[in-house]
Image: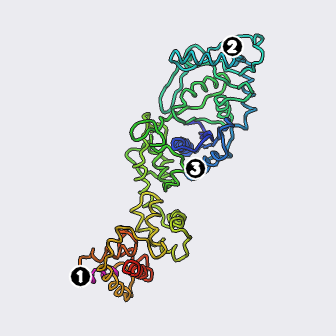
Amino acid sequence: MAEPSQVVTRFAPSPTGFLHIGGVRTALFNWLFARHNNGRALLRIEDTDRKRSTEEAITAILDGLRWMELDWDGEVVFQSKGAARHAEVAKGLLDRGHAYLCYASPEELAAMRQRAKAEGRSMRYDGRWRDRDPADAPPGIEPVVRFKAPREGETVIADRIQGDVRVANAELDDMILLRSDGTPTYMLSVVVDDHDMGITHVIRGDDHLTNSFRQTQLYGALGWPAPEFAHMPLLHGADGAKLSKRHGALGVEAYREMGFLAEAMFNYLLRLGWSHGDQEIISRDDAVAWFTLEAVGRAAARFDMEKLTSLNAHYIRAADDQRLLGLVLPLVHGAIGKELDETGRQRLARGLPGLKPRASTINELAEMAAFYVAPRPLALTAKALKQLGPEALAHLAALAARLGQLEDWTAQALEETVRGYAEENGLKLGAVAQPLRAALTGKTESPGLFEVLEVLGRDESLARVDDVGAKVGA
């Protein structure tokens, strides 16, 4: 399908809570569609619910989008600032007979709701003021302005993802455009803003489909061209149930705090409901080049934390070591209770390449790396202590003396020395290597022993062996 001369999309979150993972995927698809078509991606904060909108939520939305590198064009639009314009449009509809004043009392509306509930249907306003003269208005009731929706026929949307979708107009009631205090409703504000911002494509979750039918009717009454709609299926959990917090429906900042990389989130969310052949690892540039709405599936995509974690491990392995160091340092500082000096930073930098293949998150990487810079004497796990019996300590002391004479402190030379000591003493390598690992790391699992020795360096390695001799052998 040929696109307009300039595609304009928008991401329009409500700042009433965190930017959840489904919202980030919506932002991503809007951004990709705009960038693929050399168009514009706009950001609108739909803050018309003043009571529930918070500055904290706005900050979280902006920070989350920046972390994902989903940049927007132009200034952020705040919907609340257009209230006067929205009200002006509603009054124009009123003047042209496409809207009317409704004086239904709260008691009347409550009775409608109760009747609908008793009949097992959703509440629909019955249009009782649709054709009545405002002169009949009861005293003390401030009217709302309702849209005079078409009652005959049907409303059809040529949806870019769902195909043609339709609803009988009799299923839609006369929605409120202006509340009794004169403030505009979401349904009106969205249409006016999308028109004024030149939005050509509205890409959002299919939970907005009913809204789109109503908004399409409003566009028609205003004589404005409606944007193209594309409704994405909502995310489900790995078990097929609607996505909830137990599945991972968290704010995007939570994933950052859990140690996920932005590029892993980008790649994973891209593949939730969109595909390009069998390609799993997709770069940002390729995503922009390949993205089309036609490749978005109609079935609900399943959010799977295990798959996200596996993909994150791939991106950690591919990440630049200096960048990883910058991400790990604050976590390591917190773990050991102090900031590292230059020696510690350099040691950590030398150790990270060997740890990258073992980590699935930045948090795991930091936890694994902390032993390289932990203050002496190291805390020893129970398993590590079991490796440090009297005989093992004696061998460590003798081995340390030999290692101390090495001129070439490299992994290869260190391995030759340790293996040689074990052979000379009729020992299996593990009988020497495991106690040495426990002394150097405080644990029984680590990167390769000789890599650890090389990264720690001569002085630190020998000092750690002396520490266990003094601490455990005393």
Task: Give the extent of the magenta segment.
Answer: 413-425
205 or 378, nearer to the observer: 378
Q: Is residue 81 left or right of residue 361?
A: right
Q: Residue at x 68, y 46 (%)?
A: 75
Which amino acid, mark 3?
A: Gly
Q: Name the residue furthest front.
A: 474
Decide which of 472, 218 is in the foreground and name it.
Answer: 472
How far is disc 3 from disc 1 in space, using C-alphas? 57 Å
Give the residue number, with chain letter if any, for mark 3. 64
Relative horizontal placement of residue 244, taking residue 45 as reference (left or right)? left
203 vs 452, nearest the viewer: 452
Above or below for 177 versus 2: above
Q: Earlier in the sequence, mark 2 or mark 3?
A: 3
Relative to 146, residue 38 above or below: below
Task: Tell me, yes or no, if residue 259 can be seen here.
Answer: yes
Question: With respect to residue 321, does 176 lie above or below?
Answer: above
